[in-house]
Amino acid sequence: MAIAKISVVTVCLNVRDTIRLTLESVARQTFANVEHVIIDGVSTDGTLDIIREYPVAYLSSEKDKGVYDAMDKGSRAVTGDIVIFLNAGDTFYDDEVCERVAAFFDETGADIVFGDLMPVYLTPGDTHDHGAFTSGQVLDLSYVVNRRYLYNESIHHQATFYRRWVVKKCTYACVQPEATGEYNVLLKAVMKLGAKVKHIPLPISRFALGGISTGNFEKEWARYVKARDILRSLYYPSPDGVRIKDETEFRHAPAARALTPIERRTILKQRLKNLPFFKIYDRLARGITFRVAAQLAAVNQAHSHQLLSDIEANFRAHLAETHGQLERLRHELATAEARRKAELTRVKTALGDVGIDLQTFASTLAILNDQTAANADRTINGIGADLQAFASTLVALNDQTTANADRIINGVGADLQAFASTLSPSTTRPRPAPTGSSTAWKPTSPRSSRPRNSCPTTSRPPATPSCATPCCPNRATRG
């Protein structure tokens, strides 16, 4: 059946810096029907926002048990005829990969097709410690020519396409969890279910270095060796027990085609490994390796024990120093608290004394206020009485003054009347002169020529002031 649909599965978690590379690469494929299935582990860094910018066929974001559990979820979700797994940051080698691989499936009728891959760094600061990879150089996997090679190594999933039935029946999860991974899928499909495998001489993907399998090779290699031994016991008891009709069964080429130098060297190495001498050598080497590993483990254990002892001693010393500092701090705090309490007591006492003084001062002020009010009342009352007496005196003086003024005025009036009565017309009217007389007229009264204090009726001074003239100051007083 011709390949009509291809599924690409990407599992990711918080990969906003690299996910766009994979999304763009899948979207640019020239094959007509490419389904992109993304299994996200609940990213929180914006990865999901970037994914939603592209027309992905399936997106799931939920908690999982790890990368291989997420890959199994992707296997259950795919609907394409063939499936490939690309991690975030991995890309197809070029835009025509899917189209060429689909044609190769149709031509060979294979169940599993693997090609070559190119390891790359995504940033200048990336590193890896896997000796088999060199950034920028295509890794040629054509040396894996038959099933015996799978006894020692797996095939990278970034370079492998599976038919859908393979990933549905062969899960990444293994009955023994230590062997979970892509190696389990490959061996179960090939050794147990008889899947047909072919190699396509084509770079499939650009593989981002620095992931789980290349970032810490020593740790990953130990896990891989343990998983490989378990899988051998499950699917691959011995490479000699695998009978093959064609040494190059994974190759799709005419039988008469000459092998490449690398293929000849690989086949020669495999034949040498199958010789009894090499098997004995291999067992000896394994024994030596195990003993050396055991010795190294013992040395590492002793070194680790010493290191832990040193760390514990340093920790205890630091703990003792910290305890001493805490004790000094506690003593300083207690001293400060005692000083604070003493100062608070002193302030309270001072405030109490001030309160008593304020109460006494308030009482004194109240007494003074009362006394001042009483004195003011008495003073005001005395001033009022004095003012009333003064007013009475003024009234009496006014009345007396008025009476005296009336008497004086009446007396002056009487004197004026008496003075007026003393005046007569004979003494005041001039006498006419005789007719024809040449002598000037003179008054008959000698008043004008009398001296001061003389009586008008006599020319000599009186013995006593008995003048009755009203205007004379020597006028006798009436009895």
Image (cartoon, rainbow, N blue to C red):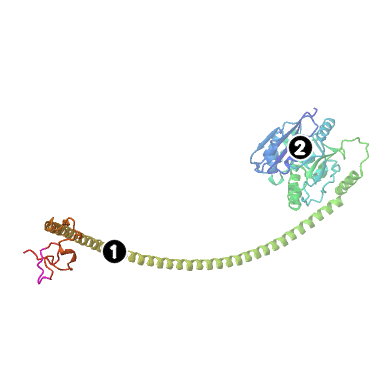
Q: Position of residue 243 (x, y in %)?
A: 83, 40
Residue reaching furthest bottom?
Answer: 463
Q: Which picture quadrant has residue 39? A: top right
Q: Nearer the viewer, mark 2 or mark 1?
A: 1
Q: Quadrant of residue 2?
A: top right
Range drawn in magenta? 461-468
What percent of the width, then of the height, locates residue 322?
57, 65
| Type of amino acid at the residue the image marks with label 1 | Ser
**Direction from residue 365 to residue 270 in the image, left or right:** right
Q: Earlier in the sequence, mark 2 or mark 1?
A: 2
Residue 111's place in the image compared with 128, above or below, is above
Residue density around tag 1, few if under 14, some if 14–19, many if 20 or more, within 10 Å:
few
Is 436 left, or right, of 306 in this rendering? Answer: left
Of residue 91 and residue 337, the one placed in the foreground of this image is 337
Q: Secondary structure at mark 1?
A: helix
Amino acid residing under circle 2: Glu
In the picture of the structure, the residue carrying the numbered disc 1 is 363
Q: Nearer the viewer, residue 119 or 259?
A: 119
Identify the element where label 2 is drawn.
helix
Q: Is residue 459 visible?
A: yes
**Residue 365, position as x, y percentages in the image:** 30, 63
Q: Is residue 465 magenta?
A: yes
Q: Is residue 44 above or below residue 289?
A: above
Main secondary structure found in the magenta portion: loop
* Residue 90: in magenta span: no
Across and down, in percent, residue 104 comes to 84, 33
Residue hosting label 2 = 24
Density class for disc 2 (Cα within 10 Å; few <14, some 14-19, many ≥20) is: few
Residue 174 at least partly seen? no
What is the count of numbered marks? 2
Q: Is residue 306 left or right of residue 120?
A: left
